[in-house]
């Protein structure tokens, strides 16, 4: 069972039980498409929760009767019936979260997200004005990927990785869509590299659902606090002049230190060495230092090779 499945039940279980008194765990399980024993486990979790989560204010259930197959009774749940009045900070947090969620939900659910966002915006007043911009690709791209993930089908991407000077067409078994720091990503299994990879959706030019069944590649690695989890190679820190600072807004960074003179020290997780070569060549003398220094060697060699080629051409 996924923890997200349980969370969905926990958020709706008390209101559902209040609206349908006298149901048994087995009857509730039929409604949620799970087992009676799982509903009992859910209720044991809710036993430690409540509207204010203070002693004596948590939800209470007649667990002995429930475990014996009897009807479920809920006490201390009256606050759930009352509409919640959001504070401004809560409304803003919800608006930002919903705006970030919208690009990665399936098309069938996107209307619900937009409707909820509109309702919160309508009641939050002028001070609730907030705009969230995400690099999330086109609606068509996201919808095709979402359908392929749900149906467990293989896709072929037309992907501009910006590291090899050309568009690649990887075959991918898609696993999930996520949002990290303003960018939407596809996580999936690359058949070419035989490993889990992460693709930025705004760099997916096209996606084709092949109709082939996606293979089972085991559990998706946990991203944790890093950008690319299991894919993360090594850290490289660049000291950037002010004119090169734009790269920290374009590429994912692990850490940015703003120096007093307007320069930056930015740390990147380098998964693809060709990406680092391209960036160093592109930024030129906008990069004042590279740590560790040997990380700059491939870019230095590429620059020398380019100069030699120019010389040979006269």
Image (cartoon, grey):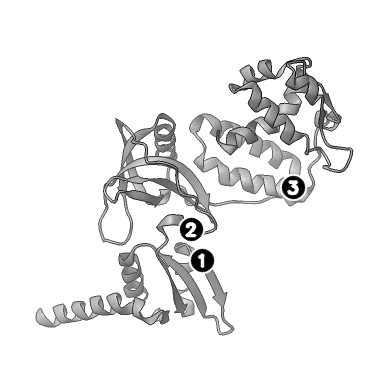
Mark 2–mark 3 distance (CA, rounded to whole Å): 27 Å
264 vs 29, nearest the viewer = 29
Who's the residue at 88% across and 42% down the image? 55
User: What label does residue 254 carry, if any?
Assistant: 1
Among the two numbered marks 1 and 2 on one chain, the one whose residue lies closer to the N terminus: 2
Mark 2 and mark 3 lie on one chain; the one further toward the N terminus is 3
Q: 309 and 81: which one is in front?
A: 81
| Label 2 crowd (10 A; few <14 / some 14-19 / many >=20) | some
Q: Nearer the viewer, mark 3 or mark 1?
A: 1
The answer to whether any part of residue 174 appears in the image is yes
Mark 3 to mark 1 CA distance (whole Å): 28 Å
- x, y percentage for residue 282? 34, 72
Label 1 close to label 2 by CB (< 8 Å): yes
- Name the residue that disc number 3 marks: 90
* Residue 287, above or below 92: below
Q: Which SS class for mark 3? A: helix
Q: Residue at x 29, y 75 (%)?
A: 299
Residue at screen point 44% across, 42% down: 219
Residue 154 drawn at (x, y percent): 33, 36
């Amino acid at each position: 069972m996924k923890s997200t499945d349980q969370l969905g039940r926990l958020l709706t279980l008390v209101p559902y039980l209040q609206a349908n008194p006298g149901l048994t765990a087995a009857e509730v399980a039929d409604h949620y498409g799970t087992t009676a024993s799982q509903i009992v486990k859910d209720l044991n979790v809710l036993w430690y929760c409540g509207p204010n989560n203070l002693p004596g204010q948590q939800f209470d259930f007649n667990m002995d009767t429930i475990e014996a197959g009897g009807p479920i009774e809920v006490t201390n749940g009256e606050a759930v019936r009352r509409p919640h009045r959001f504070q401004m900070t809560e409304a803003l947090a919800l608006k930002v979260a919903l705006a970030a969620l919208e690009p990665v939900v399936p098309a069938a659910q996107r209307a619900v997200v937009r409707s909820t966002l509109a309702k919160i915006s309508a009641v939050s007043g002028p001070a609730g004005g907030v705009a969230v911009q995400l690099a999330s690709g086109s609606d068509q791209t996201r919808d095709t990927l979402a359908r392929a993930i749900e149906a467990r089908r293989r896709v072929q991407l037309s992907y501009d990785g910006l590291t090899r000077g050309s568009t690649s067409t990887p075959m991918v078994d898609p696993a999930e869509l996520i949002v990290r720091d303003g960018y939407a990503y596809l996580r999936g299994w690359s058949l070419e590299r035989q490993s889990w990879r992460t693709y930025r959706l705004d760099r997916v030019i096209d996606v084709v659902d092949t109709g082939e069944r996606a293979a089972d590649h085991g559990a998706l690695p946990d991203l944790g606090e890093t950008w690319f989890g299991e894919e993360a190679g090594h850290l490289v820190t660049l000291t950037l002049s002010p004119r090169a600072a734009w790269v920290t807004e374009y590429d994912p960074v692990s850490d940015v230190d703003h120096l007093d003179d307007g320069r930056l020290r930015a740390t990147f997780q380098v998964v693809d060495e060709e990406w680092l070569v391209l960036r160093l060549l592109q930024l030129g003398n906008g990069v004042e230092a590279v740590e560790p220094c040997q990380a700059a060697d491939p870019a230095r060699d590429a620059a020398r090779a380019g100069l030699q080629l120019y010389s040979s051409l006269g």
